[in-house]
Image (spheres, coloured by chain):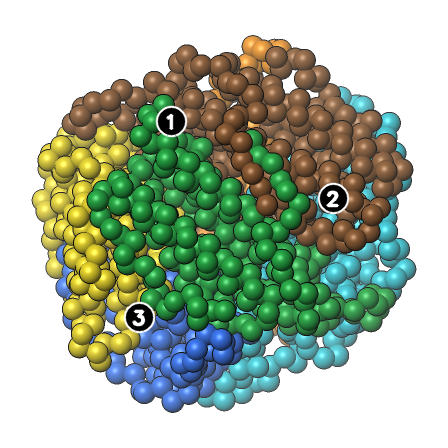
Chain colours: A green, B brown, C cyan, D orange, E blue, F yellow
Amino acid sequence: MYLRIDRLQIELPAPKEPDPNAAAAVQELLGGRFGEMNTLMTYTYQSFNFRLHKNPALKPFRDLVSNIATEELGHIELVSATINALYVGATKPAPPEQAPLKPLKDARNTYHAAMTGLGAFPFDSHGAPWKGEYIFVSGNLVLDFLYNFFLEVGARLAKMRVYEMTDNPVAREMIGYLLVRGGVHALAYGKALEALTGVEVWRMLPIPSVPNSKFP
Amino acid sequence: MYLRIDRLQIELPAPKEPDPNAAAAVQELLGGRFGEMNTLMTYTYQSFNFRLHKNPALKPFRDLVSNIATEELGHIELVSATINALYVGATKPAPPEQAPLKPLKDARNTYHAAMTGLGAFPFDSHGAPWKGEYIFVSGNLVLDFLYNFFLEVGARLAKMRVYEMTDNPVAREMIGYLLVRGGVHALAYGKALEALTGVEVWRMLPIPSVPNSKFP
Amino acid sequence: MYLRIDRLQIELPAPKEPDPNAAAAVQELLGGRFGEMNTLMTYTYQSFNFRLHKNPALKPFRDLVSNIATEELGHIELVSATINALYVGATKPAPPEQAPLKPLKDARNTYHAAMTGLGAFPFDSHGAPWKGEYIFVSGNLVLDFLYNFFLEVGARLAKMRVYEMTDNPVAREMIGYLLVRGGVHALAYGKALEALTGVEVWRMLPIPSVPNSKFP
Amino acid sequence: MYLRIDRLQIELPAPKEPDPNAAAAVQELLGGRFGEMNTLMTYTYQSFNFRLHKNPALKPFRDLVSNIATEELGHIELVSATINALYVGATKPAPPEQAPLKPLKDARNTYHAAMTGLGAFPFDSHGAPWKGEYIFVSGNLVLDFLYNFFLEVGARLAKMRVYEMTDNPVAREMIGYLLVRGGVHALAYGKALEALTGVEVWRMLPIPSVPNSKFP
Amino acid sequence: MYLRIDRLQIELPAPKEPDPNAAAAVQELLGGRFGEMNTLMTYTYQSFNFRLHKNPALKPFRDLVSNIATEELGHIELVSATINALYVGATKPAPPEQAPLKPLKDARNTYHAAMTGLGAFPFDSHGAPWKGEYIFVSGNLVLDFLYNFFLEVGARLAKMRVYEMTDNPVAREMIGYLLVRGGVHALAYGKALEALTGVEVWRMLPIPSVPNSKFP
Amino acid sequence: MYLRIDRLQIELPAPKEPDPNAAAAVQELLGGRFGEMNTLMTYTYQSFNFRLHKNPALKPFRDLVSNIATEELGHIELVSATINALYVGATKPAPPEQAPLKPLKDARNTYHAAMTGLGAFPFDSHGAPWKGEYIFVSGNLVLDFLYNFFLEVGARLAKMRVYEMTDNPVAREMIGYLLVRGGVHALAYGKALEALTGVEVWRMLPIPSVPNSKFP
């Protein structure tokens, strides 16, 4: 069971100018193979299938993946809010005859104009839908956590690149926050892998080796 | 932001005998076009894109879709628990040479055996993944709620049919509960449509016209 | 069995200037989730599966969906003609060395240039193919018609938005016609639902509440 | 524009016994890569994009593909009728508690039971949807007709194999008819290719080299 | 078993100026329905399934398709090298804060920027992945080779059109080479069809009828 | 450039009895998300995009991934040979009227019967095609190799489970060989990660912790 608190995890700056193509790029971080939908759903289904919960030695691992999964719900909310913000001011109210959506005819993402009413949806930067086949849930704890560790650093790379594609302050505020949280999650899965296997895989971090401080 | 409470919405009966093909069928109610993933994600993204929240007249509608969305998170958890339960006892521990997974070679869903470790994942009864393109979020309130009303009754039909495909008590307990909750949601969206348009669309219910009491 | 009459449902104006990105946007109305392929195929398969035709009380409903399905065949023809028209003049004949298709390298839809010879095909505005999974055919008459009612108003919204994305006269002539016919179909399904359930769902129309007269 | 005549192209025998797995196999001939949806849609879009119709030398080719396209509409109708027929008697009316759909839980196609009400839909024998990307429409007449010739013989092979998978009389009656019509179409495209290129490609027929008479 | 020689089939000219949208278009020739991935995989699986190799009369056909398949491995390598070359100089190293990837935000293919690090991958010009369902392998030799013949000329058309979309010298050098090799393959399959059926289908070539010399 | 040697990497035992459902399961190891198509294509495209080859320090990593990629070509060949072998004897030659393919109507994979002529193709155990989106190629060496390490152990789990689903000697011989080779590759990527980051990630192996000797 879940509860919702009607508040974003961080406050986003007020949008200053619209940027439809940045909105298109940010969709990669929502519905792409390394977007928040994927971290959310991978961890959620791993936690759902954690059936050996009678074994007290496994409880900390189940708690870890459950807690991160719940936090990721707030992440899809935050990325969605950003996408909405990037469209504020992109069109001006006008009678249909004046073609008020014409500025969007040449934009990267025409689903936003034709389908969602300039809102977010679980698709990537090319308008391909998020798919359940992106998740990984194997029933093998070490393997699942090794994937989670990889997924967090793969998602880190995607976030960095979208950051480098746009200087919009709303997008950057959101990405900066997610980079910090993603770093915490990568470390947590790395530490869990150490507890399970003795290997200090977390010492590889950060991957890529650029520190978060470069993405202010 | 969200919180998770580590408890299912209802208690499921202890599994008595495994039923892999029932598990395959129940996946339709998780990752199918009318499964809980779709109600969950449709309502979640509608609530995320509800940007006109400054207008107090719209707040009740936003609250409605947000609350149902949050409840649906518990539904994917419940259906997943059912799928796990349907595999209890389906295989016996044995050395690989004895082919302990052989009983599942002819089962409907071989991903469960080969990939998920006999756990749930967001796929339908044929092993097709849930896709973001299943959701509907248009930015038009009446249209969104008309879809939600349709989606609830479409999901009702799917649940009834899966119920009629299996007499497994765990599956039936879960479906019986979801039929009741789905009925509440359909009525709620119907009443909201009446408030918005004056049309008592909820008087069509139940669709199909068989009452829930036939699905004990 | 079917017959074809070699004539479009309406005459389209002669194309004046090419608009490849409008052609890309119009594809949404052909192969998108709310495009004419979907109304066509949904109604066609509903009519094919209407096996209870021995019951004379059901005959009017079967006739209704069969007739609209047949009309939709003319709609995919009309939208396709529009897409072809939007490319007239988009390229100039020249030897390959002069790269006569270069103006289309940056266009929204590169399949048109590389694959179809600047013709129509059953894809949406992002180049995603129409898929059989878009259709809805449940075997439950009330539910099928409730979907059809929703589908018509969903398609109305998509048409309005594509209209607002382009002021090309060929595209607008086609969309204006389809808005009128779609309104007739929505009303017809609404009236059928009233006959079946007593609820005057058609009183919700038009959805969105902007009248067709605003889309001349 | 199109007209519909409420009659199948041939009369099908009355179904004697249900065969759900034959229904699943026959879906390959409806929504598979070599099913009737594909011949229908390939020819339909080729005819729609045939813009050079002012050139009288091309008119016979346009007429050919238009006429075959229209005939294919009757083919999807006929295959759909067969799929419906194969389910007659597959279930017995009973209260839900008795699980009247239980015989279908282990069937090859569970969408039929859970979604379509035991009716046809544009999917293949594995429940994968027909997709617009299956069609071929290039704007090059020789190439289009070469594909059509290939498509007809590819479809012939698929039909023969489904015939060899079931001895159900309804399925065989339908397939026997389609083999004859497909042979006519293959020959017609072959003769058109001869007219266009001088090569008697039709002399390769039949492919496979087994005559239709072996499929009574 | 295979061996790899670390050398491209031809030398490509040094890239002079970046052209991200040409890179996007060239992806059609790698992962599109008529791209090199498809010729490669179609021929490879046909050769793998050629089980009648005990029959010496069939050996030449098996050798033919095996050899061309192996050559196609070098083709995906060559097209990939071209895509990489088209990005040389497209971005300038800079700290993230200066948004060094910003020039690519509006480009046709944002996966290249966000996911692959400006490298090639098996996707088409719209960012749709190559799919195993594109290949054709039927077990019928005449039909397989008829498809291969069609595939080569279909691929020829796609190459010509991408050539006409860009005047970039690297892209043109690669396409010119592939047009020549594709012509050889089309002829080889045509001659094999003649050996199998007596029909001189290769006399249709070239399709399209424009000679290769026009694509220097 | 590549060369092909007409020999499998190991000799497979002569097939004794057909097992169509084992053939269906083995497809997971060919075209599934952890099948040989995916290791092949991931490594191949990583090697293609390895543009920094001027830096001699990177050459060993490029050589590593290139060599493993080439070996994987032999793996898809071997798995395909196995699938073919599993169908030997599955049908008996007979005139179509006797429905010689009827035993396959109820089999897990009906594409094999209807489409491929009982041969292999790049699809998974549910008949879903391998897709280019399964590969991972990021342009970041540590991240790519971390994925490769994960991919090898994920593939190991899939192989073990398919092994446990069938006791067919041909399937087991092939899987036993691939388990050994996969172990070598996992170790190699692990050692490369150590060279790049100093972390002895390979000490986690084997994942799952069951030794290969249990899969004779």
Q: Nearer the viewer, mark 3 or mark 2?
A: 2
Do callouts 1 and 3 point to residues on the same chain? Answer: no
Q: Amino acid at mark 3?
A: Asn
Give the SS element for disc 1.
loop
Left or right: where E5 falls relative to B8: left
Q: Which residue is drawn at the image coordinates 78% and 45% (left, top)?
A: B59
**Residue A54: quadrant of the picture:** top left
Report the quarter where the N terminus of chain A lies. top right
Instruction: Give how far apart the Cα atoms at labels 1 and 3 are.
Output: 44 Å
Residue C9 vs D73, above or below: the answer is below
Towards the viewer: A24 or F143: F143
Give the SS element for disc 3.
loop
Towards the viewer: D22 or F2: F2
Chain letter of the residue carrying label 2: B
In the rendered image, residue A115, in percent from the top left (x then y), is placed at 68, 55
Q: Nearer the viewer, mark 2 or mark 1?
A: 1
Query: Which residue matches tag 2?
Result: B62
Residue F31 vs B101, above or below: the answer is below
In the rendered image, residue D163, in percent from the top left (x then y), is placed at 42, 33
Left or right: where C12 falls relative to E135: right
**Residue A105: quadrant of the picture:** bottom right
How many residues crowd around disc 2 within 10 Å: few (fewer than 14), some, or many (20 or more)?
Answer: many
Query: Which residue matches tag 1?
Result: A53
In the rendered image, residue E102, in percent from the top left (x then y), is placed at 51, 76
Q: Which residue is drawn at the image coordinates 77% and 42% (left, top)?
A: B61
Can residue B84 be seen here? The reply is yes
